[in-house]
Amino acid sequence: MKIRKATMADLNVVVDILRDGRNQLAERGVDQWQGDYPNVTHVREDIENGYAYLVKADDGQTVGTLAIVEAPDHFYDKLNGEWLINTENYVVIHRVAIHSRHAGKGYASKLFLSLIEYLETERPDIKSIRLSTNENNAAMQRIAIKSGFKKVGTLHGAFRPNELSYVYELLTKVRVA
């Protein structure tokens, strides 16, 4: 599995995968992404800022997308909890989705393994990877824990007034030269 930065030529692919992800969440009864988030404007900004990535399977098919957002991410300023490490050298994972055509093949787990390896290899300055998910998104919670993330707290009303999000963090293996 490979992760590569998305370009403006990939805009429609990323938007399609995220819309499909929104539909999958709705089918599972998860009230995450059921409004106007994420939308084309978010994706365009992610691409312009170098945050948007496409996930390709070993056979070359594009199976998913994610955003790797550079610190600081003020989305987490009101964390009810405590980070594993107090650092400015972190990234936040947002807008993760595997297209339903590729569901059930373990791609989400492989995505996280590839992501961690990518960051530890390409970004040795990064000491922490952070993410959050809706309290009812059990699938993302399982993947985060399976990938080594620890639950560090909650966020109330991050996107909508009554929404509760669980927050996770993984400390990277900082390599010493």
Image (spheres, rainbow, N blue to C red):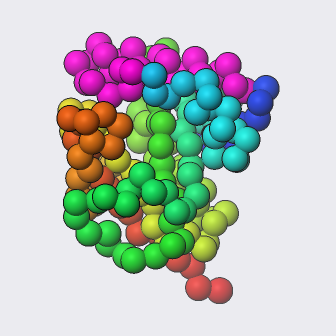
Taking the magenta stretch, the answer to whether it contains residue 64 is no
Left or right, 150 with respect to 59, comes to left
Quadrant assignment for the N terminus: top right
Q: Position of residue 108 (x, y in %)?
A: 43, 36
Q: Quadrant of residue 4?
A: top right
In the displayed orientation, state which residue is furthest to the bottom.
177
Quarter in which the C terminus is drawn: bottom right
Q: At 60% from the left edge and 74% from the top edge, which residue is drawn? A: 125
Task: Report whether residue 102 is seen.
Answer: no
Residue 144 versus residue 171 in the image, above or below: above
Identify the image quadrant of residue 12.
Answer: top right
Q: Residue at x 30, y 53 (%)?
A: 167
Q: Residue at x 65, y 21 (%)?
A: 13
Using residue 117 as the reference point, say whether residue 87 is left or right of it. left
Q: Is residue 3 above or below residue 24?
A: below
Determine the residue located farthest toward the front in the rendered image. Answer: 161
Measured from the top left, where is residue 115 in percent x and y? 54, 51
Span shown in magenta: 10-35
Residue closer to the observer: 101 or 165: 165
